[in-house]
Image (cartoon, grey):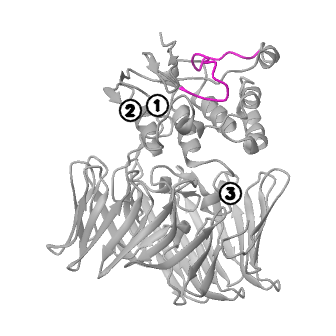
Amino acid sequence: MIDPQGGETLYAYDAVGNRESVTQANGQTTAYVYDALNRLTRQTTTDAADNVIADYRYTLHSTGRREQIEELHNGRVSTYTYDALYRLTHDAISDPVNGDYSAEYRFDNVGNRIYSIIDGVHTAYSYDDNDRLTQQGGVTYAYDANGNTLTETEDGLVTARYTYSAKNKLLAVTKAGETTNFGYNPDGIRTRKAGSGATTDFIVDQNRDYAQVLQEVVNGAKQFSYVYGDDLLSQARASDVSYYVYDGQGSVRSLTNQAGVQTDSYHYDAFGILLHSEGGTPNSYLYTGEQYDASLDQYYLRARYYDQNQGRFTQMDTWMGINSDPVTLHKYLYANADPVGHIDPTGNMSLEGHMAGIGVMGTLLTLTLNQYQVGQSFANGRSLAGGRYTDQEIGWLTLASSSPKLMSLISVKAKTKDNSQKIVPLARAVEDVELASLYTCNCFALGPNMWPKQFFNTVGEAHKFGGDYLLGKLKIERYHIVEVSISESMRRELRDSYEPGIGPIVEVPNELLPAFNADMKLHGGWTYTSTHP
């Protein structure tokens, strides 16, 4: 990959698609080592002269959860303990340079943190019937009817006040008498921040898996430019360039200059509290590689904001979750209460951080956010489909179909769990399907933010979609999962074991479409007639 300044970044992969190494424009190289199950066990970054910048070694439980992280370059060791539901209960850090750290957590039955002991400080937490945090130690919280945090109060004084739009986007925060305002584009992505005499416009690339900031323009003058590969690679300021060094979770752990010399370092606890930092380079990208907002003391995760001090979101989740996985139904929980093994770049759902293993933008190899969301939705769609597949089978099939590079991994895992012997052959049959086409296909156009909304409306009102793509109004009663068409040769090959059960087959090659209970007049003048019973 060649960046705008002419710098080259090189990526190398092993035979099954795991990233083996990344060499950046300043000569630093990050190498990755995996176990037999393709789980990251070591990650080492060296400069052009092969001097070690960072070296992380991961000890994994048989379930894949990280039990220990050794930072061989500085002697820091983090040890993690989990309860029977895989929630993090103890984060113990031994650090010979900056001092030790200990955090213990207790949870209620649904995953709310009810007690913590952090470096000897005991804190109790209280919640209402909607799992909204009402008190943390001496701080109380109030909410609006949509579940957004409105105020924080301590010793009878309001210390923070939040204002939201009709679409539940944070518009302003007032702390210590200082107000910061935020602006968003029509897709809900943050594009402006104004406060303390400065207005920052964020130039955003929404064509990536997750919307990313390309430039920050402060009071009309370009101040920061960012270069991306799979991850954020570098930051340019005037004549200076800094390069990002990550750990296996995707958190930024240090910055290096153009000569590969480390200029800044960062150390966090498991939930993202910044424990120690060195260096003075301006940088907002920290925990899990995401954008930290100092005016909020929170992280901007696109759909909403994450408070690392609470270990939870400050707004209610708009994603419904998966019925068969109860922890995903919680409206405020971050990373399923396991921030060591999960990340949440969308602000809507947790992804397994160790599957990415190579930084937040490398999540699930080439699997995009939209593909993952649709896969999760399909896995929850058995009641809509009325078919014979289990939730797990639908999930495997959808994930497999979304990325050919996942096929070998999917096949290995599915064979150990697929008693029906249907997942692997079906996955191969549809491995070329691109689920991203759901948003831009030539037959049914929905924006990325509209599709999940429509998918989850199992009983809908009349919806009007603009432009020439869909004309008129459509009353949506419920959705089916519609299977991709499979060739007759593949059908013959699978005849003994192939029983669709997902929904009607639609003869639209290489597309997956929702089935409606009414005809749709589509772009191009043809009509899609549902086979909904």
Left or right of 97, for residue 276: left
For marks 3 and 2, the one nearer the N-term is 3
The residue identified by callout 1 is 469
Front-most of residues 269 and 472? 472
Span colored in magenta: 497-513
For marks 1 and 3, the one nearer the N-term is 3
State the SS at label 1. Answer: loop
Residue 76 vs 60, above or below: the answer is below
> Pointers 2 and 1 in contact (CB under 8 A)?
yes
Residue 90 rendering spot, x and y as whole percentages: 52, 66
> Pointers 1 and 3 in contact (CB under 8 A)?
no
Determine the main secondary structure of the stretch shown in magenta.
Answer: loop
Q: CA distance from mark 2 to mark 1?
A: 8 Å
Front-most of residues 190 and 143? 190
The residue identified by callout 2 is 465
Left or right of 357, for residue 335: left
Residue 233 rendering spot, x and y as whole percentages: 64, 71
Residue 524 vs 286, above or below: the answer is above
What is the three-letter code of the residue carrying label 3?
His
Crowding near pointer 1: few (<14 within 10 Å), some, many (20+)? Answer: some
Q: CA distance from mark 3 to mark 2?
A: 49 Å
The residue identified by callout 3 is 61
Judged from this view, the residue extending furthest toward the right is 15
Residue 313 vs 383, above or below: the answer is below
Residue 527 rendering spot, x and y as whole percentages: 50, 17
State the SS at label 2. Answer: loop
